[in-house]
Structures are given as structure tokens and as C-alpha cells.
Image (cartoon, helix red, strand yellow):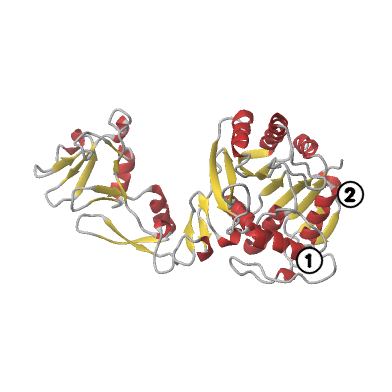
């Protein structure tokens, strides 16, 4: 096995050399241990383990005893966590057959952490299986430290904005301040039980404890969180947050006496200028105007991704065939799904380091190259492949991505999409390094 420093340069992209992409071959656990010894650190780590489907492909083992699978995967999860920086993200991909064992491995082998499960619709037509057709797989984002996804521009292919209307992601929405549900009582969250005081004109004039209101006029009234059955409830935010929102006109009283507020997501949109405060109404509440282009919405999507750009057949298998004619690899992921996953976390980290533990056809490294070319970043990747077959596919693909020419010397047909970013044959930025053969 060789070190990263021993890897020679194979190809340089035609648009420059921003970002180094390293391909290693062999047992990924051994490589992970070596990277740990070298003191390497990564901002984004992908683990796309064998799904244990019961079907082997060439030299790719995909039939495991359940305990063996969990043990092998758990070791690699622990090693990957040790390679992550203080603020980093681990992405684990899996389907429904191994979702529960995967979650158990993460719970067992990682320290306390925050994670989210995203369902990505990767096969619009569905794949035949016993029972319902398989249309989705799962992306498990495991956050370390302060790492979290950030809003980014989402085009119409995300299906968040419908033609002629706005979905919930595209609306300016004020949320009800009253927390609903039987268990949300004053005792359950004392910091969220307080009064709002209004004046005779129906304006909210104070938030909090009664001693703060001794100099106010007698024509005011108190509003407490009272539920529809007449029992006391609680507000959704604490008193300090409510006072802050009130100071900005982001707490308002409706005609029926209901109170609404701007949630943190809407406040972020206002602070970024995507939503503008154009005036204040007669009750002191802000009047908001959406400055966003409905075709290019800046937002975080929900936990169900239904973007046509995420089709694994069209932007995984068919794209790979164009990049590496004569070579094959089963079930590559969509280039654009992986680019989106990277961009939500690394858009503000143009020099981020990315590790693909179970690299197959090199989709993640290709996605990083495309992201670099789109925002002039210099993110680097390390991809670990198991065997000669996947190593050949990965290196042929990344060489084609950099040079725009396939392994047969032909220009790769087609263009990068979502959004349009030029011909594939123009090549991308970056330098490719290979483990010596």
C-alpha cells in the first residue's frame, strides 16, 4: 500500500488545476487506518456500503451474515469518524433492506450526534421487486460538531415550486405562536408561558412579565396561550425570542386574536435579503415582499427529495456509459444528487476535503469536480476502491471528466445540466492522482 504522497499525477483538467483527486485501491479499512496515522482530516465523508442484497456482482461481495456485515461496517464507521474534522458531516447511503441495521450501527459505533434521514426518489419508474416497486433510497446525514446544511439555490427541477403556484417552500408564511398538542402545557416548558400585552388599538406593546408593564395605559389587555378547549398551553418560542421578534415587527396579532410570528427560517430569508420588509401595518407588524425568483428558490428542501435530476438511471448509469465506454458498473448514483449533497454542506468551504470510503464509479469525486468548476472552488477528494474493476472504472471516469475525452479518445457527448453548465467535452478543473499499479 502506498501513501498519498507517493501517488503520481495522471491527468490535469483542461481548465486549470484547482483541486486534487486521489484514487486508492484495496481494503478500505487498511487505507482508513493509514490516513488516520498520517493525521488526515476531512470535512465530508461518504460511506456507501454493500447493501447486503444477497446478490454478488463480479468481485463485489454483497452477501453477508448480518452480524458480519454490522461488524465490518461498524469498524469503517468508527475509522471514518476519527478522520472527520471538528465540524464535519458523514453521509451514509442505504436502501430499505438494510436501513434498520445501518441505523443500529451508527447508534452503536458513534458518540452522541445529530442526524437526519433524507428519502431520495432515485427511480421515478421504480425497480421491480417482490411487492411494491422500489423508487427510493435513503441518505443519512450524520452531523459532527456545528456542521449543518445551508440553504442554496434550487431550480424548478426540484419540484418545490409548482407552475402557477407556490408550494409551502415558496411561501412567506407566518406561523402560529400557540403550540398545539395535548402535552404542551405551561409545566412542560415554563419559559414559553408568558403574556402579551396589547393596547386599545390592538397593537402588541409588550412581551413578558407583568412588572415590565407598570407604566402602560389601562386600556390594554393580556393575551395568554389558551387552547381551543379553554385550557392553558404554551407559546412556541421563549420570552426573549418573542421580544426580539416583536422589536423587529415580526410578531403580529390577527383580527381574530390569534398571534403569529416569523420562524427562524423566515428571519434568515429577511436577513439575507431574499424577503424584504417594505413597510409596517397599522398594528406595527412588518409587511413582507418576496424578492426571490420562483424559478431559482434559495431554500433548504425537506427530507423528501423528488428532483428529476436525481434519477440514478439517467444521470447515473447512462451518464457513466458515455464517460467510460466498454466498461460497466452496476447502480451508480446520480451525479447531480451527489453534487447537491456536497453543496448543501460545502458551498461555503471552497477548499473542503472529501473522502469516499466505498468508492465505486467515482460519482462523488466527479460531483466535487463539477461543483469546483461551478463556483471556482478547490475542493479535493480521496476515493478508495476495492478491486481492479472498480478502480479502472473510477480512474477512466475521472480522467474523462477532467479532459472531456473518453478512454477511446472520443469527445464525451452531452452537457452538464441542472443548471446548464457547458459541454462535458470542455473538461473540468482538477488534478488526478493514482495509486501506483
Camera-nearest residue between 33 and 243 = 33
Question: Which residue is most to the front?
Answer: 130
Sooner in the amino-acid sequence: mark 1 or mark 2: 1
Identify the image quadrant of residue 426.
Answer: bottom right
Q: How many marks?
A: 2
Q: Quadrant of the N terminus?
A: top right
Q: How far from the left and from the top, in percent, is residue 10?
A: 85, 58
- 117 left or right of 48 in image: left
**Residue identifier under label 2:** 436
Which residue occupies 61% across, 70% down? Answer: 420
Pick the front one: 290 or 137: 137
Q: Dot 1, crowdedness within 10 Å: few (<14), some or many (≥20)?
A: many
**Residue at mark 1:** 403
The correct choice, above or below, for 44 with respect to 423 in the image is above
Comparing 109 with 402, the one in front is 109
Horizontal and vertical percent for residue 228? Answer: 21, 40
* Residue drawn at (84%, 69%) of the image: 409
In screen coordinates, is 28 left or right of 95?
Answer: right
Question: Can you give x and y, in whole percent of width and height, for residue 69 in the image?
Answer: 71, 34
Q: Residue furthest left?
A: 218
User: In the picture shown, does residue 321 fall above or below 183?
Assistant: below
Q: CA distance from mark 1 to mark 2?
A: 21 Å
- Seen in the image, is 78 located left or right of residue 56? left
Nearer-the-camera pick, 349 or 325 = 325
Q: For the residues labelled 1 and 2, say whether their Cβ atoms are less than 8 Å apart.
A: no
Amino acid at each position: 500500500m502506498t501513501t498519498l504522497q507517493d501517488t503520481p499525477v495522471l491527468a490535469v483538467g483542461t481548465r486549470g488545476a484547482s483541486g486534487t483527486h486521489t484514487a486508492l485501491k484495496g481494503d478500505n479499512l487498511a487505507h482508513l487506518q493509514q490516513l488516520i496515522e498520517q493525521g488526515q482530516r476531512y470535512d465530508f465523508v461518504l460511506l456507501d456500503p454493500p447493501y447486503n442484497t444477497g446478490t454478488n456482482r463480479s468481485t463485489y461481495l454483497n452477501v453477508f451474515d448480518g452480524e458480519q456485515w454490522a461488524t465490518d461496517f461498524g469498524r469503517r464507521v468508527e475509522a471514518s469518524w476519527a478522520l472527520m474534522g471538528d465540524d464535519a458531516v458523514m453521509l451514509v447511503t442505504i436502501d430499505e433492506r438494510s436501513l434498520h441495521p445501518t441505523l443500529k450501527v451508527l447508534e452503536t459505533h458513534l458518540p452522541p450526534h445529530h442526524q437526519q434521514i433524507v428519502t431520495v426518489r432515485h427511480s421515478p419508474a421504480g425497480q421491480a421487486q417482490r411487492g411494491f416497486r422500489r423508487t427510493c433510497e435513503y441518505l443519512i446525514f450524520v452531523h459532527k460538531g456545528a456542521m449543518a446544511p445551508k440553504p442554496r439555490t434550487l431550480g424548478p427541477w426540484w419540484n418545490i415550486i409548482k407552475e402557477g403556484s407556490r408550494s409551502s417552500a415558496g411561501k412567506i408564511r407566518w406561523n402560529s405562536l400557540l403550540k398545539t398538542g395535548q402535552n404542551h402545557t405551561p409545566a412542560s416548558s415554563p419559559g414559553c408561558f408568558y403574556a402579551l400585552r396589547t393596547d386599545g388599538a390592538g397593537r402588541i406593546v409588550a412581551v413578558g412579565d407583568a412588572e415590565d408593564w407598570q407604566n402602560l395605559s389601562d386600556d390594554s389587555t393580556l393575551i395568554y396561550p389558551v387552547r381551543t378547549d379553554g385550557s392553558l398551553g404554551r407559546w412556541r418560542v421563549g420570552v426573549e425570542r418573542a421580544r426580539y421578534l416583536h422589536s423587529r415587527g415580526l410578531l403580529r396579532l390577527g383580527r381574530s386574536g390569534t398571534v403569529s410570528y416569523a420562524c427562524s427560517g423566515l428571519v434568515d430569508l429577511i436577513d439575507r435579503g431574499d424577503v424584504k420588509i417594505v413597510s409596517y401595518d397599522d398594528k406595527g407588524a412588518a409587511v413582507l415582499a418576496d424578492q426571490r425568483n420562483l424559478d431559482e428558490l434559495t431554500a433548504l428542501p425537506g427530507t423528501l427529495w423528488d428532483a428529476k435530476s436525481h434519477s440514478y438511471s439517467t444521470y447515473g448509469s447512462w451518464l457513466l456509459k458515455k464517460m467510460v465506454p466498454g466498461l460497466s458498473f452496476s447502480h451508480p448514483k446520480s451525479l447531480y444528487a451527489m453534487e447537491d449533497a456536497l453543496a448543501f454542506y460545502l458551498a461555503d468551504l471552497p477548499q473542503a476535503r472529501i473522502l469516499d470510503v466505498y468508492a465505486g464509479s467515482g460519482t462523488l469525486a466527479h460531483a466535487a469536480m463539477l461543483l469546483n468548476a461551478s463556483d471556482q472552488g478547490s475542493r479535493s477528494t480521496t476515493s478508495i476502491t476495492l478491486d481492479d474493476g472498480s478502480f479502472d472504472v473510477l480512474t477512466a471516469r475521472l480522467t474523462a471528466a477532467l479532459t472531456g475525452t473518453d478512454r477511446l479518445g472520443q469527445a464525451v457527448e452531452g452537457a452538464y445540466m441542472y443548471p446548464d453548465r457547458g459541454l462535458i467535452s470542455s473538461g473540468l478543473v482538477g488534478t488526478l492522482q493514482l495509486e501506483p499499479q
